[in-house]
Amino acid sequence: MAAVDEIPGEWAQLYEWAPVTLDGADPLTNDAVYSVLLVKGDKVQAFSEAGRVDFKLFAPGSGSVDTDADIATARGTDNEGFPDIDYSATQTGEYYVDAYAPEASGVTTDSIYISWVPFTALTRNGAAAQAVSYAQRAGISCTLRDGDGAAFDLKVPVQLWRSVAGGAWDLVTTLAETENPVKSYTAPITTRTAFKMVVAEDEFTQGSTSAIKTVIPGTSLQTPIAPAKMSHSKYSTIFGTLKPRHTARTTPVRIYKWRLVSGKWKSAGYSNAKASNYLSFTKYASSVRLPYAGKWRVRAYSPADSGHAATWSSGYDYVTVK
């Protein structure tokens, strides 16, 4: 079968060698034109086996390889110095690859290879940061899109990378290759964790990296346990538990105090609570004196740190002071 020598040519059989015989001295047999449909950002590549032919690329809407201007920036040479095409589409449409024999070269026989490398973009779904409870499942969701921004059902491996507490990025897993353009991953979060998704670049896919999603958990802070009755003249211990483990002998928790005055809770400041190791986590405790008789309540608070958001205990404990 003779090559089609004019636009629109024939549809390129991508990733297959196409034998051609061209005559540089005959305008009717000097071109082999192939059509390829590209979305904005897609890359088209073309080269020959023996390097005996040259190439031109024509944009959507072109009418003739003999009279229209080609996309000159698409032409180049490969590592062996052979003519080739390597071009990323600036618009969506039907492009035309023209393989031709140089003038006066006579009859030329070669094989042409045309490839299509799709543009991919992983767009993060949702906000850049998310606050969660301690050990709540959370993570990142991205949508794989083409160069026009449309959801793309290309089956490619998507890598999930994670950075814990500002540390180095580690590859956690490679998500299954499915036609669903939405890619998601979640895990229990116990310290500040950043996520991103990556499509690795290879000969069949352009690489892309999503925007980063950071998940910030609170701590797991037990409501403080206080004696039901206390003396206004004596110190008593108020305690609870804190996850994750914090450094012993530091004061990662505050115990806030309120006194009931004329039917309203009046703030009485806070006392720092010291950490000690308890099982795999932390016990906090503070020696507290409530200086006036009456009804009191206490609540625990852990300030924000590099790995966790500020957290209040879920409830209060109540004390009667004599």
Image (cartoon, helix red, strand yellow):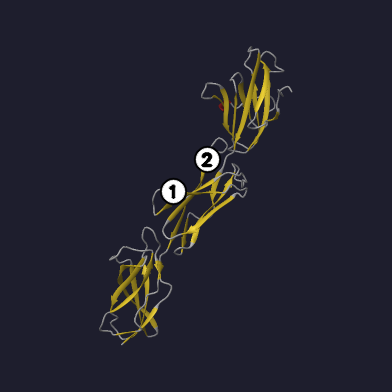
Q: Residue at x 36, y 64 (%)?
A: 245
Q: Is residue 136 above or below residue 208?
A: below
Query: Which quadrant is home to the C terminus?
Result: bottom left
**What whole-number distance in Å separates the C-alpha atoms at marks 1 and 2?**
18 Å
Image position of 41 (left or right of 236)? right
Q: Is residue 267 above or below residue 216?
A: below
Q: Residue at x 60, y 43 (%)?
A: 146
Q: Residue at x 44, y 48 (%)?
A: 170
Q: Residue at x 40, y 77 (%)?
A: 316
- Label 1: which secondary element: strand
Q: State the residue in front, 36 or 18.
A: 18
Q: Quadrant of residue 82?
A: top right
- Residue identifier under label 1: 170
Image location of residue 260, percent across then percent down: 37, 83
Mark 1 or mark 2: name the one nearer the start of the chain.
1
Q: Can you see residue 203?
A: yes
Q: Residues within 10 Å of mark 1 (few under 14, many from 20)?
A: few
Image location of residue 29, percent across then percent down: 71, 18
- Residue identifier under label 2: 207
Amino acid on which disc 2 is placed: Gly
| Front position among marks 1 and 2 | 1
Query: Which quadrant is home to the N terminus?
Result: top right
Amino acid on which disc 1 is placed: Asp
